[in-house]
Image: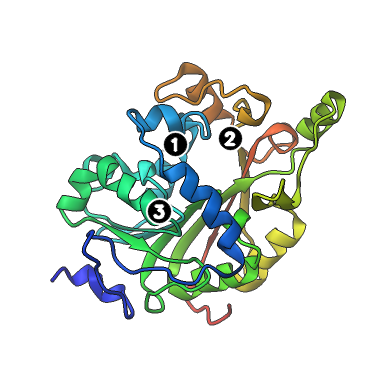
Amino acid sequence: MNSRLSVFEGVVQQEDGIWGIVDNYGDQALEKSLREEVAAKDYEDYLEEISRHHSISVMDNEVKKFISEIPHGGTILDIGGCWGWHWRFLADRRPDLTIFIVDLIRQNLVHAKSVLKQLIESERCFLVHGNAISLKFKGESFDGIWSVQTTQHIPDYDLAIREIFRVLKPGGIFCDYNLNIAQGTKAVYKLMGKNYHEYGVVDGKFFLRRVNQDTLKSVDSIFNGKALVTYSEVLFSPELKLPLGGRFKSLLGRVDAKLTGSGNLQRLFARQCGICIKKSNDSNHG
């Protein structure tokens, strides 16, 4: 058996090859229903569909920076990894790394099998049906934890962050990307007569919390440190029907990737806010 599997705590591989099973969705039941509808569809081109919701060039650049922080032979946990598209180049760029992808929706992980076929067959990637607020991993198991637009949909944010802190190794890095409260974009919404949702349930379909001061305070408090905050997807605005630059190798997307930063312009207009923080080597907080 692969020695990497020792990170599991009471998790069994199911007949479909996916590890674990979620049988209690709690206050994420609403989210489950919506995401299952999306996951039930067939997709001929995964990257084309992804480009409608994420800027692939921007996030590929963020992945590159993230994996540069992971030590040789390290293990990564992706929370809410969905189809696993962030890791499609891992076998070429960092074949020494192992990735565990956790998602609340099992069908998303079935799609991930197609996207990451080679990585899974080489046992450098394991798909896990799990819930971020109750991770079935032993403490201090991962060198890096990555999450993109997932914790924003979890009502009990503190609980999710405490679980992340628990399973992250001392010295390990956590990077979390969620929707930003972009005051400039908010003003544009107001001029257009559109609602700019910041917190709560959206149209009875799903819960959304944009990154706010309470979010940042929670991370800093649980990690007993100060997170690096950056803003990304400055040009990418799918909510305004402008998913420009989202496609893989898009020139506009590459420009957008270079605009990622912590300046006032980014803060005012960026769609996404990234929070990255390291767990202290002598940390026993959380």
| Horizontal side, residue 256 vs residue 146: left or right | right
Residue drawn at (34%, 62%), measured in percent from left and top? 128
Q: At 41% across and 26% down in the image, what residue appears?
A: 48
Instruction: Quarter of the image for the C terminus: give it.
Output: bottom right
**In this orientation, does residue 122 appear?**
yes
Q: Is residue 10 above or below residue 200?
A: below
Mark 2 residue element: loop
Residue 202, percent from left and from top: 71, 47
Question: Label 3, on which residue?
Answer: 69
> Which of the marked residues, 3 or 2, is nearer the chain's N terminus?
3
The residue at the point 57 percent across, 70 percent down is: 26
Give the labeled residue for mark 2: 260
Closer to the camera in the image, 69 or 204? 204
Q: Three-letter amino acid code at disc 3?
A: Glu
Q: Are marks 1 and 2 in contact (CB under 8 Å)?
A: yes
Q: Which residue is mark 1?
A: 61
